[in-house]
Amino acid sequence: MIYKTIHRLKLDPSQKQRNVDSDDQIIEDVEKDVAIWARNQQQEIDQLKTLENYRRDFLGNVSHELKTPIFNIHGYVHTLLDGGLQDDAINIKYLDRTAKNVERLITIVDDLEAISKLESGNLALDITKFEIKDLVKEVFETHELSAQRKHIQIQLKEGASQSYQVKADREYIRQVLDNLVLNSIKYGRSGGFTKVGFYDMDKYILVEVADNGLGIGQEHLKHVFDRFYRVDKSRSRDVGGSGLGLSIVKHIIEAHSQTINVRSSPDLGSTFGFTVAKV
Ligand code: ADP
């Protein structure tokens, strides 16, 4: 920038007449420009540093998540090989646990794949018009058995009798509902309920998935959409969670240029609400 200014001045003979004051002015201007340039550069460096930390944390989290099931499988398989296979007291039990850990690995890898697709921004949405109430009913059917096992009632909220036509990618919205309904069961309490309600908000429909389960403490609420964040790590692992579900949900909603939020109180329950564009 400084060189360019000097070059310009050399080219322009009229500038030869300039006095000391205008020289000072030029230097002041250049100084200002350089300061702005330095500030922008610093911002860019800070941004790159944040991204680098983010990438390092992510790698660390991924390897940590994968390690637990891999070590478990390693332990079970070697115990079986070292004679456990002939021991009827443990052989089936250890094979069963091995299978569970393999399933955990599959869940983690599937979720990682989904996250990477969503974050690369190459998400091609297949927007169609559909009745969101029907989709919710389909999702209920998928989870009926797990809900029954935990004695949790899954139902539409009273008064949800009218039709709610929306436009969105049906399969991705199914994934969102799937995750929210499944979480409400996983973190629900025996004898409890999950209720899905719809609210007409002019340009969009607000869909709320409410449960009266364990709830989430205020200090955790702003983190639940972060990758790998779990309020209670051991409980989440017990119920087969990867800690990626809600971050996938948030990505999908944001890809639709819509919003998602959560209200919750420990011991009382949680309500996750997201919006979908109305037809
Ligand atoms: P996970 O695979 O662990 O379920 P999620 O990203 O789906 O991961 O959820 C993140 C964390 O948020 C969970 O580990 C759980 O602690 C908490 N959470 C999610 N949904 C609920 C809910 N309906 N009730 C209570 N806690 C919840």
Image: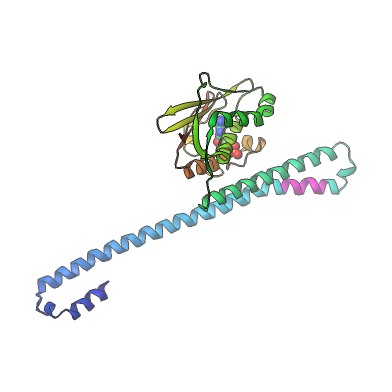
Picture quarter containing residue 152? top right
**On the rendered image, what quadrant is the N terminus found in?**
bottom left
Q: Horizontally, is 29 left or right of 187 in the view?
A: left
Q: Is residue 273 above or below residue 27?
A: above
**Which residue appears at 25% of the width and 65% of the height?**
33
**Which residue appears at 28% of the width and 61% of the height?**
36
Is 127 within the magenta?
no
**Which residue appears at 30% of the width and 64% of the height?**
37
- Which of the pair 23/143 is nearer the observer? 143
Residue 259 in the image: x percent, y percent? 45, 38
- Which of the pair 190/177 is nearer the observer? 177
Residue 160 in the image: x percent, y percent? 51, 22
Residue 207 in the image: x percent, y percent? 50, 30
Q: How is the image coloured?
A: rainbow
Q: Is residue 82 above or below residue 49?
A: above
Instruction: Determine if residue 172 is in view.
Output: yes
Split into quadrants, the picture shows ligand 1 in the one at top right
Q: Horizontally, is 192 left or right of 20 in the view?
A: right
**Which residue appears at 60% of the width and 28% of the height?**
137
Q: Horizontally, is 97 left or right of 180 in the view?
A: right
- Which of the pair 248/237 is nearer the observer? 248
- Residue found at the very far right of the displayed protein: 86
Magenta-drawn stretch, dominant element (helix, strand or loop): helix
Q: Which residues are magenta?
A: 71-79
Picture quarter containing residue 245? top right
Picture quarter containing residue 20? bottom left
Residue 47 in the image: x percent, y percent? 41, 56
- Which of the pair 63/153 is nearer the observer? 153
